[in-house]
Image: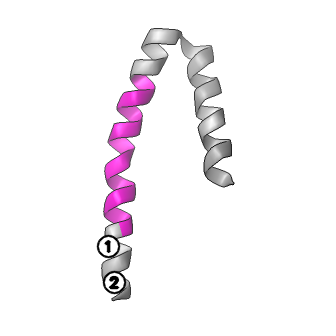
């Protein structure tokens, strides 16, 4: 059971990386680098809590 839970978590985590990279690239292209850095910082702070 633990292996299945780990596999689901790993698949979801690894599968979200390309989506986040694409969204980050679009945000950086649309709003500029400084806005992208602020969005990334906010996301990091939100994830940690």
Instruction: Tell me how many marks there are.
Output: 2
Q: Secondary structure at mark 1?
A: helix
Start and end of the magenta stretch? 9-25
Q: Residue 43's quadrant in the figure?
A: top right
- Quadrant location, the N terminus: bottom left
Q: Residue 6's quadrant in the figure?
A: bottom left
- Quadrant location, the C terminus: bottom right
Residue 22 in picture, x, y percent from top left: 35, 30
Please tell me whether residue 23 belongs to the stretch shown in magenta: yes
Residue 33 in picture, x, y percent from top left: 56, 15
Residue at (36% x, 78% y) in the render: 5
Please tell me whether residue 26 belongs to the stretch shown in magenta: no
Residue at (46% x, 20% y) in the render: 27
CB under 8 Å between discs 1 and 2? yes
Q: Residue furthest bottom?
A: 1
Please state if 13 lies on the left or on the right of 11 as rendered.
Answer: right
Please state if 24 lies on the left or on the right of 12 as rendered.
Answer: right
Tag 1 residue: 7
Residue 46 in picture, x, y percent from top left: 64, 45
Residue at (65% x, 25% y) in the render: 38
Residue 7 in picture, x, y percent from top left: 32, 73
Residue at (43% x, 12% y) in the render: 29
Tag 2 residue: 3
Q: Secondary structure at mark 2?
A: helix
Q: Which mark is residue 26?
A: none
Magenta residues, dominant SS class? helix
Asked if 18 appears above or below 3 in the picture, the reply is above
């Amino acid at each position: 059971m633990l292996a299945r839970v780990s596999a689901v978590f790993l698949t979801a985590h690894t599968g979200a990386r390309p989506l986040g990279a694409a969204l980050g690239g679009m945000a950086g292209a649309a709003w500029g680098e400084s806005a992208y850095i602020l969005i990334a910082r906010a996301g990091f702070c939100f994830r940690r809590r």
